[in-house]
Image (cartoon, rainbow, N blue to C red):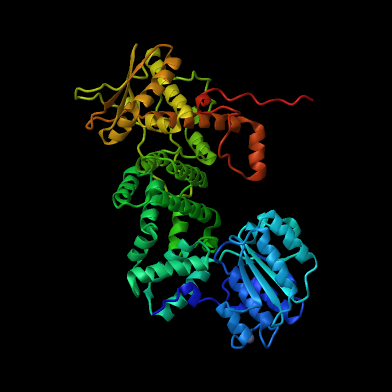
Amino acid sequence: MSYLVLARKWRPQSFDDVAGQEHVTETLKNAIRQDRVAHAFLFAGPRGVGKTTTARILARALNCAQGPTPAPCGACDPCREITAGMSLDVQEIDGASNRGIDQIRELRESVKYASVSRFKIYIIDEVHMLTTEAFNALLKTLEEPPPHVIFIFATTERHKVPATIRSRCQTYDFRRIAPAEIRQRLAKIAEAEGAAISPAGLHILARAADGSLRDAQSLFDQVLAFAGSTISDEDLRNILGTMDEAAVRDFARAILDRTPEAAIEIVDRLAEDGRDLKVFTREVVTRVRDLLIANAAGEKTGRFVDLTEAEVRELIEEGERVPAETLHMLYQLFVRTEDELRWSQRPRHTVEIAVLRACHLPQPVILADLIERLSQAPAEAAPPAPQPPARPSSPSRTPPPPAGRRPVSAGPRPVSHENRQPSPEPGPAPVQSGQGGQSGDAESVWLNLVREVKKKKANLGGYLEQGSLVRLDESRIVVGYKAASAFLQDMIRRKENRETIETLAKGIAGRALALEVTTLPDDAPAPPTAGERLEEKEKKGQKARAEAAMADPLTQSALEMFGGKLVSVENGGANAAGANEPPEAPIEEEG
Ligand SMILES: [Zn+2]
């Protein structure tokens, strides 16, 4: 009993059967009808989208006993011989394994002989693999092709085909096939094969095939062999190794809600199930991309994403509740994480750290909210006086969520110093700030240290940023973590990491500091982490810059003129370290 794989069994036999390449097949049909068939074709496009299939149909159309015809009969001798791959006049050559000059010389010899049927047709697949000498030999034939010879070249890498060859060919660009088209084809096959598969299952298959119908069919083959004729979505995920889409959606939602524990729970569950976190992160990147599209395109989102109608509605709802700026930052963060995962020895940690960062991204400041706040509190309206970089902390002034959007939970807020109760339990005492120069210095050393470590080793900086300064004295710097962050503590304690931090600390403090890591008591409010303090400072800096910018009559008239809003004010060349510096005076042009 022979089993014919689906891709062969369902290979299109006519131009009209070819999926998703109407722009090619219609042109070819017209050329045949008008008897204007070229002598050399170049079919370019991704793998598995129908290039060789179309080449064979073209061969049949030209050599059919009733042809040349746009609709070859499929029953005459030439048609059947071509379908079976037995035609003496239609030769298929694999460019990858016949890439040398000798094979092309052979071809040039055979070109001279007359054909049995109307045309002698050479289909050279992966033509870009030919050697330069082979191309040169081929070129001679292409320059003066015998009237009965037709070349059809196929390539996945058109740019590797020499321009001298390309210029003698009629080029056709084959496209990646749309997921909807692939789903439709698979549904037809499933029905004919008596296989039960859900619409969601077809979605999963089509997405995994990434635009290639041949890949989709061979994946379907694998699934049928594994699951038999009833295919559950779970089977599909097991075979294809694709991610549970609900997990990706829930994860993205947890990030948008700034609830790291929910997101980390999902990561841990996937890791324990042995799922590939790299694949997962790639899906997360796609999800954030889809949210960005939804944020920008609103009701038209369905045209740009491959999701069911209900999923699109949910996507739009989620995409619109977060500012686009935040989604942009999330996109970059997860693209970077995907990249880091290629080398990471501990993928789970890498993704967990990404979660913590994602949940602590700064909220974009929208000027309208600032103005509203300013008008409510006139005493604050004066531009702030220049401040020393390590000013003792004041209550954080987190702007409210942007108007017209559903409020987003801001995640763990920095504990305000004024409200902190002294811990009744013995344990590491939080560093006292707001009580004069000494502690202010301690904090500025600490925050500078975190910044420098981040610059030098982004990963390590990310770990350090999640810690809080517990104590800084003449010879020691003590950093505290919550008990739940045991792995962060382990990372910081590693010899090479500790040395990096201590070296940088010495440079900043001007004296040797030994790094100690401690666990913060669970029952006392935790002091703010470095990340939270830096974020707070960045916000204050933004606010100061925004206020100064608004005080500038130029900005005011510009905003009036364009009806715009000020999203952020870049402090020329300054990074977060300069956030508290006074805004630069506007440069006056010389008359
Ligand atoms: Zn025929």
Front residue (pair 367, 488): 488
Front residue (pair 539, 346): 346
Against 562, residue 4 (above or below) is below
Query: Does the rendering let one see residue 543?
Result: yes
Q: Is residue 475 left or right of residue 158?
A: left
Identity of the residue drawn at 66% across and 38% down: 557
Residue 504 lies in quadrant: top left
| Identity of the residue furthest to the left in this view | 425
Q: Is residue 49 left or right of residue 170?
A: left
Identity of the residue drawn at 63% across and 84% down: 78
Query: Which x, y percent locates residue 560?
Result: 64, 42
Front residue (pair 397, 312): 312
Identity of the residue drawn at 41% across and 23% down: 500
Query: Which x, y percent locates residue 29?
Result: 69, 78
Front residue (pair 468, 222): 222
Query: Which x, y percent locates residue 295?
Result: 51, 53
Residue 435 lies in quadrant: top left
Tag count in the figure?
0
Q: Quadrant of the N terminus?
A: bottom left
Query: Which x, y percent locates residue 13?
Result: 57, 80
Against 276, residue 184 (above or below) is below
Q: Quadrant of the C terminus?
A: top right
Against 475, residue 264 (above or below) is below
Query: Does the rendering let one see residue 310?
Result: no
Q: Is residue 525 left or right of residue 334?
A: left
The quarter of the picture showing ligand 1: bottom right
